Amino acid sequence: MKIVRLYISFLMVTIFCALPETSADEVASDEFAQLEVIDAYIELRTGPGRGFPVYYVAEQGEWVEILKSKTRWYKVRLTNQKMGWVIKNQLKKTLTVDGEEVLLDDPDYQEYLERLGEVGVLTGDFEGASLISIYGGYHFTKNLSTELSLSQALGNFSEIRMATINVINEPFPELQPLSWLSDVVPYVDEVRMSPYFGIGVGVMETLPRATLVQTIDRTDNLTFVTSGLKFYLTRRFLLRLEYRKFVVLTDRNENEDVEEWKLGFSIFF
């Protein structure tokens, strides 16, 4: 598990460092390029992320100058020429030269709210079988979208292939950041969570994999309800946790109930 955590941390750092920087002109107008600290202090880190150490603290009354930004981190310079990275939430605790409260836009999160579609890969469990699934979705509004997914589940005796289409509703797409989760997940800041619910239909094909136990090839229609959580991480990345409850419409007298759990990453555009 330690190796897995180290690998995930390395992957997040690699992705984060690959993100482009923007100049101060793109993130702040000239009228608040110079900011006065009004809170007790703000912390300057050596790099743009919570994984970097705090090396200096700017106290109340000091002035900072915004130089550039990277996601939700801003590189600033103090009047004593010390430079460091400050998270956006702390820069809100400053005033402009006119004594007005600082207003910093979040263009990345606004793009998330206005996204047209998303694609992703998830893995999990389909009634005891190992599952992998890919999907693509189109958003009609912030709240309503449709998704098409293709899945494969490998059990001990059979292989299952599925194609599904569903309608998703996100009742609360603009939730507040989960600050406690941002502290836990390295190099990710202001994680936001949005629950969703949906219904869908699909088709499932069952193919035999074992020679000792003979199963019959069959194709069944299915319906399902789904619920889950989307976690907006940073830039165009989402973490997604999903549960589905299937009703398999068989040719026999009784239908089958099947449960599915899966977790994965998505990107939006």
Image: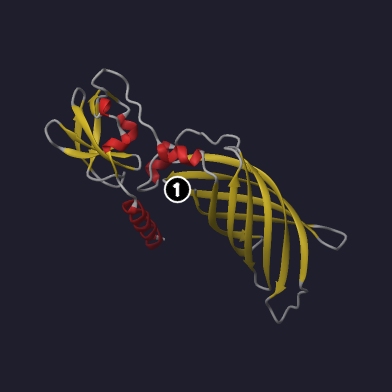
The residue positioned 54% from the left and 54% from the top of the image is 119
144 lies left or right of 55: right
Image height of 259 relative to 86, above or below: below
Image height of 186 relative to 255, above or below: above
Would residue 6 be visible to someone looking at this image? Answer: yes
Seen from the viewer's position, the closer of residues 205 and 40 is: 205
Image height of 227 relative to 35, above or below: below
Type of amino acid under label 1: Arg
Specify the farthest residue to the top. Answer: 99
Specify the farthest residue to the left. Answer: 80
The residue positioned 37% from the left and 58% from the top of the image is 11
152 lies left or right of 113: right
Q: Which residue is mark 1?
A: 236
Seen from the viewer's position, the closer of residues 143 and 2 is: 143
The residue positioned 61% from the left and 60% from the top of the image is 125
Specify the farthest residue to the right. Answer: 253
Label 1 crowd bin: few (<14), some (14–19), many (20+), radius 10 Å? some
SS label for mark 1: loop
Q: Position of residue 126 (x, y in %)?
A: 64, 60
Q: Position of residue 64 (x, y in %)?
A: 20, 30
The residue positioned 63% from the left and 65% from the top of the image is 152
Q: Position of residue 36 (x, y in %)?
A: 23, 24
Q: Which quarter of the picture shows residue 101?
A: top left
